[in-house]
Amino acid sequence: MQDGFLTVSVLDNSTNRPIEGATVNIYSIPLAGERSSPVYQNLKTDSSGQVTGLTLDAPDIIYSQQPSDVRPYSQYSVEVSVDGYETVIIDGTQLFPTVEARQNVPLKAKTRCKNSYSRQNEEVYGIGENTLYGTYAPKIPESSLKPIPPPTGFVVLDNPVVPEFVVVHDGLPENTSAKDYWIPFKEYIKNVASSEIYSTWPEQTIYANVIAIISFTLNRVFTEWYRNMGYNFTITSSTAYDHKFIYNRNLFDTINIIVDDIFNTFIKRPPTSRQPLLAQYCDGKKSQCPNQMTQWGSKDLGAQGKDYESILRYFYGDEIVFEKAPIVSGVPVSFPGETLQVGSKGKYVKTIQNQLNAISKAYPAIPKVKEDGIYGNSTAEAVETFQGIFGLPKSGVVDFKTWYEISRVYVAVTKIASLTPTI
């Protein structure tokens, strides 16, 4: 066994604000599937709604570096309770060795009309297996380029735009009883990557797989694929049609940071197509997909030192190009195009100072700063504290990924987004 690491973040489901003083219990889940005695008991969340620095057993890293009959991650049950809220249990939080896992736990305020999932006074969420280990339907092959809908259909934009949300249909397209979830775009990509690849893989392999997931998703968005078939969602959680999405699953820092870095990057095949490539893939072991990427193949190429562009061109062809969607929906101000750091001045610095101060009302560990448009040491300290809370590298500078994560949290805690998000 090796050490894995876990941070638990507890949030109010309706306000997106952290809940201080919640009680967190962690149980291991042996192979038999029943919860054991607590590994950690009666932990209390801090002012940021977090319990951090938890070290837990995970299988040896070798099991995630090659196909194996041994589950390459350990599973834990996370139980959270606090007065005034329904107790939530996440069954199946996954931990890999050497990697920080982050489990968000949204709590609903208690109401007189109680609707629990399966246990009285508790909401229980089961986290399914990673697709590389579990058994899921293989992807049904499709054309990688889609016809643009006719004028009578939904409007398709001239260029791909990163939507604020995607609506995930949690089942087969025709299953009318399946739930639809409104998921922020970045969180959806992180969820899928955490569900379909291993977080211990080489960095460039993770980059390649994340870009494939982004391209596939933006193709569904750009072509209004399901809406033009009469459905009211963006994408499904079915591996036969789209990607595996697992509601309330934990995410991994190695994946999160990469998604934050490139969430608007996609691939396409010029010169005839302006749409993102529907970048289909398979594992390459349990299923095969000629002329598409294989996940284990991408892992091997990454282990050989190939960069993500070389990996993706190996599978999808030398003619693919990498582009960035110029518009990110749902943010107050777009990234200015240059990193902000000590010595920077101007309106973009003031924007970050204003947003950090607003966020600090919900996350008091973030120190208040003077909104003077001058990036001094106090602003760098506030940025570094923010980065630590939200799993970004603690650099104290505002780069692309930090800018958009500050924007995301600012919108979430101030509720400036419209009540009915657009996609």
Image: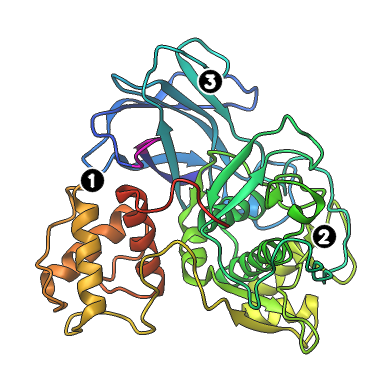
Q: Earlier in the sequence, mark 2 or mark 1?
A: 2
Residue drawn at 58 percent across, 26 percent down: 30
Q: Which residue is mark 2?
A: 284
- Give the total number of marks visible in the rendering: 3
Residue drawn at 35 percent across, 84 percent down: 338
Q: Amino acid at mark 2?
A: Gly
Q: Earlier in the sequence, mark 1 or mark 3?
A: 3
Residue at disc 1, secondary structure: loop
Compared across the picture, whether 218 is left or right of 226 comes to: left
- Disc 2 versus disc 1: nearer the observer: 1
Q: Looking at the rendering, which quadrant does residue 207 occupy? A: bottom right
The x, y position of residue 154, in whole percent, is 72, 61
**Labelled disc at residue 144:** none
Tell me if label 2 and label 1 are in contact, CB under 8 Å: no
Q: Amino acid at mark 1?
A: Ala
Compared across the picture, whether 311 is left or right of 37 comes to: right
Q: In this view of the protein, can residue 399 be seen by the observer?
A: yes
Between 22 and 375, the one lying in front of the other is 375
Q: In this view of the protein, can residue 306 be seen by the observer?
A: no
Q: Which residue is mark 3?
A: 35
Residue at disc 2, secondary structure: loop
Mark 1, Cα crowd under 10 Å, few <14 / some 14-19 / many 20+, is many
Q: Amino acid at mark 3?
A: Arg
Q: Which residue is mark 1?
A: 362
| Residue numbers of the magenta segment | 10-16
Task: Find out whether residue 281 is within the magenta segment.
Answer: no
Question: What is the C-alpha distance between the residues marked 2 and 1?
Answer: 45 Å
The x, y position of residue 368, in whole percent, is 12, 58
